[in-house]
Amino acid sequence: MISYWNTPLGQMPVLEVDGKELLKAQRFSDTLGGNLAELTKLLTTTKSKRYLGSLEKRLGKNKDGKGWFVGDKITFADIQVFWLLHDQYPTVFGGRAGDVDYLKEYKLLHGFVERFKAEPKVSEWLAKRPVTPF
């Protein structure tokens, strides 16, 4: 097991690939960049299904998934999850921000994104913000 105390320079985080410890962020991106197709496949299958399933289950515990993640109003948690589902995950799945077709098997999460987008201030912001690939 890798720990702070037994790394060569006492640095964290450490990424281990094929038995080699990578200590610098640039090395992470250099190594991972060469395996983009493999990483995308991993993210879009096993890992993402488990993560999205957990989010779906959690959302379902509040008003049967027809409300927000916590309580009766939008919280910071909802903002973060919306950003992840609306802007970040679509790019992992090969789409653009706002393309949430990948959520079709997660009805509660898809509904959450649509409810969030329908909020007046959110829809106003989405209409005028610059569209970027990330």
Image: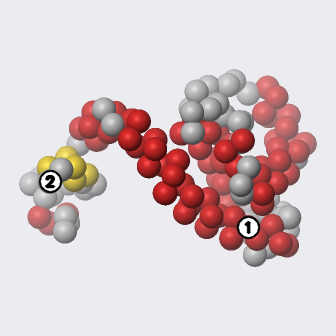
Disc 1 element? helix
Identify whether 86 is placed above or below 61. above
Identify whether 27 is placed above or below 127. below
Q: Which x, y percent locates residue 113?
A: 77, 49
Dot label at residue 24: none
Q: Which residue is mark 2?
A: 19
Residue 12 lies in quadrant: bottom left
Q: Residue lying farthest bottom?
A: 61
Mark 1 neighbour class, 10 Å CA radius: few under 14, some 14 to 19, many 20 or more = many
Q: Quadrant of the N terminus?
A: bottom left
Q: Which residue is mark 1?
A: 59
Residue 30 lies in quadrant: top left
Work out how far the residue at label 1 is from the one at label 2, CA to CA, in angstroms: 39 Å
Q: Give 42 or 126, whichever is nearer the viewer.
A: 42
Mark 2 neighbour class, 10 Å CA radius: few under 14, some 14 to 19, many 20 or more = few
Q: Give 98 or 119, whichever is nearer the viewer.
A: 98
Label 1 or label 2, whichever lies nearer to me, is 2
Q: Which x, y percent locates residue 81?
A: 66, 54
Residue 28 lies in quadrant: top left
Q: Amino acid at mark 1?
A: Leu
Q: Give 76 or 85, whichever is nearer the viewer.
A: 85
Q: Is residue 50 left or right of residue 104?
A: left
Q: For the point 14% across and 53% down, which residue is it? A: 19
Q: Amino acid at mark 2?
A: Gly
Disc 2 element? loop
